[in-house]
């Protein structure tokens, strides 16, 4: 069985195109079999994008989208924050290929799209890290994303995470508080929690 958080280049293609308004920008996406939420932008990603785009105290500096899939979060933020560079990473080669095509289709150039398992191929530090983590990859992967963010944030840098309550948001909040010293739920909507932590 194929999972969106793995690589399976042999999976049959079934590409699907659609447009969606994110953070006030109308973007066009191509998705396919083997990627997360291929028919539309999932609700959690939409809430996360809106929260980050509207944050009045968003930390300065480049942005990292961990587990970017075919690109909705990273590309929406790159379109919204044209003066920032956005790095987008995933383990799924098909998703990365789609993210690259979607960046080109929308004329978004302030992005770097690369293959990385969690932070394995990530260099440097960021002002903001965002993630809609691959819950089905298991708690260990999600925890590694949360804990690893600390070392990839500049002082004052911020981690934003979207998780459903039933998929472990309270546990993730506890993990973030332990690693960062403090974390908070900054939005709740239809069972989705947006969690935020700041590196001291």
Image: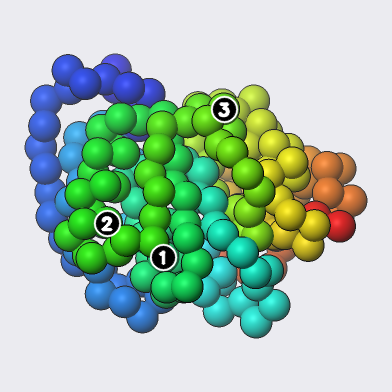
Picture coordinates of residue 17, whole percent (x, y): 13, 55
Residue 114 visible, this angle: yes
User: Callout 2: 10 Å neighbours few (<14), some, many (20+)?
Assistant: many
Query: Which residue position is annotated with label 1?
Result: 78
Distance between the alpha carbons at the discs numbered 2 and 1: 9 Å
Which disc number belongs to residue 103? 2
Res. 151 image quadrant: top right
Which disc number belongs to residue 1? none
User: Callout 3: 10 Å neighbours few (<14), some, many (20+)?
Assistant: few
Sequence order check: which comes first, mark 2 or mark 1? Answer: 1
User: Callout 1: 10 Å neighbours few (<14), some, many (20+)?
Assistant: many
Distance between the alpha carbons at the discs numbered 2 and 3: 23 Å
Can you say whether 62 is above or below 99 in the image? below
Residue at screen point 54% across, 51% down: 64
Sequence order check: which comes first, mark 2 or mark 3? Answer: 2
Of 17 and 62, nearer the camera is 62
Picture coordinates of residue 157, whole percent (x, y): 72, 59
Residue at screen point 25% across, 33% down: 94
Q: Are marks 2 and 1 in contact (CB under 8 Å)?
A: yes
Picture coordinates of residue 84, whole percent (x, y): 50, 67
Picture coordinates of residue 126, whole percent (x, y): 63, 54
| Element type at mark 1 | helix
Q: Does 68 sit left or right of 53 as displayed? A: left
Q: Does 55 sit left or right of 38 as displayed? A: right
Query: Which residue position is annotated with label 3?
Result: 120
């Amino acid at each position: 069985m194929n999972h969106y958080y793995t690589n399976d280049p042999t999976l049959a293609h079934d590409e699907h195109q659609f447009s969606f308004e994110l953070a006030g920008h109308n973007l066009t996406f191509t998705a396919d079999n083997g990627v997360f939420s291929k028919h539309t932008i999932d609700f959690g990603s939409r809430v996360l994008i809106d929260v980050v785009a509207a944050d009045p105290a968003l930390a300065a500096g480049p942005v990292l989208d961990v587990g970017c899939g075919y690109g909705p979060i990273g590309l929406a933020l790159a379109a919204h924050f044209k003066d920032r560079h956005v790095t987008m990473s995933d383990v799924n080669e098909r998703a990365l290929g789609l993210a690259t095509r979607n960046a080109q289709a929308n004329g978004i150039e302030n992005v770097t799209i690369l293959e990385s398992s969690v932070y394995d191929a990530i260099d440097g530090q960021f002002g903001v890290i965002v993630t809609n983590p691959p819950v089905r990859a298991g708690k260990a992967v999600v925890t590694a994303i949360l804990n690893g963010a600390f070392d990839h944030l500049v002082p004052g840098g911020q981690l934003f995470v979207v998780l459903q309550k039933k998929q472990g948001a309270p546990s993730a909040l506890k993990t973030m508080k332990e690693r960062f010293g403090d974390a908070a739920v900054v939005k709740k909507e239809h069972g989705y929690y947006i969690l935020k932590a700041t590196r001291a």
